[in-house]
Amino acid sequence: MNSLWPIIVGGVLPAIFWGITAIFQKQSATAATGSAVYLIAFGTACAFAGLIAALVWRPAPWSLEGLGLAATAGTCFALGTGLISFALFAYGVPVSKLAPIWSCNVLVTLAIGAIYLGEASELNTIKLAAGTLLILSGALLVSSA
């Protein structure tokens, strides 16, 4: 298998789909759909996608721990998504101003992965600092455009 394939499947395609998601989220907000209704519709679509994936991929056996961790991830995702939807709906913020800021989520993931998951030893501190500076600079630059 080509080593680029996992990057495309797990990185490039999700980035494209999440970018498109933000556009539809903004359109939903401008169509006067509040964040609660958005989360219900969004969650329902996610549940249907999960059912289809279960039929196609035949998932691994379930564990209580795995379900709890998945539910925690879903709760965090729902809180973030709900807050974005609320800001789009209530304040009419342009999605192009918010997207660069919420894309800094990689820094949160990186910090938690380094500390909580013990992945700090795998990181190059100089590259990490430079990348963090570039991400924050880029987010500030793009969101102020």
Image (cartoon, helix red, strand yellow):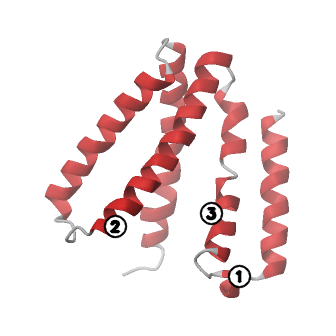
Q: Is residue 43 above or below residue 109?
A: above
The local crowd at label 3, few if under 14, some if 14 to 19, many if 20 or more residues have their Cα within 10 Å, is few
In the displayed structure image, the side of residue 73 where residue 91 appears, left or right: right
Residue under label 3: 109
Residue 65 point in image, percent of width and height: 34, 69
Q: Which amino acid is tagged 2? A: Gly
Q: Nearer the viewer, mark 1 or mark 2?
A: 2
Residue under label 1: 123
Q: Which amino acid is tagged 1? A: Leu
Q: Nearer the viewer, mark 3 or mark 2?
A: 2
Q: Element under label 2?
A: helix
Residue 92 point in image, percent of width and height: 66, 17
Question: Decide: marks 3, 2 in contact (CB < 8 A)?
Answer: no
Q: Residue at x 62, y 81 (%)?
A: 119
Quadrant for residue 86, please give it. top right
Q: Residue at x 83, y 70 (%)?
A: 129
Say which mark, if any, is on residue 74: none
Q: Element under label 3?
A: helix
Residue 93 point in image, percent of width and height: 69, 23
| Most distant residue in the top direction | 32
* Cα gap from disc 1 to disc 3, whole angstroms: 13 Å
Residue 145 point in image, percent of width and height: 82, 33
Q: Which comes before the other along the chain, label 1 or label 3?
A: 3
Residue under label 2: 66
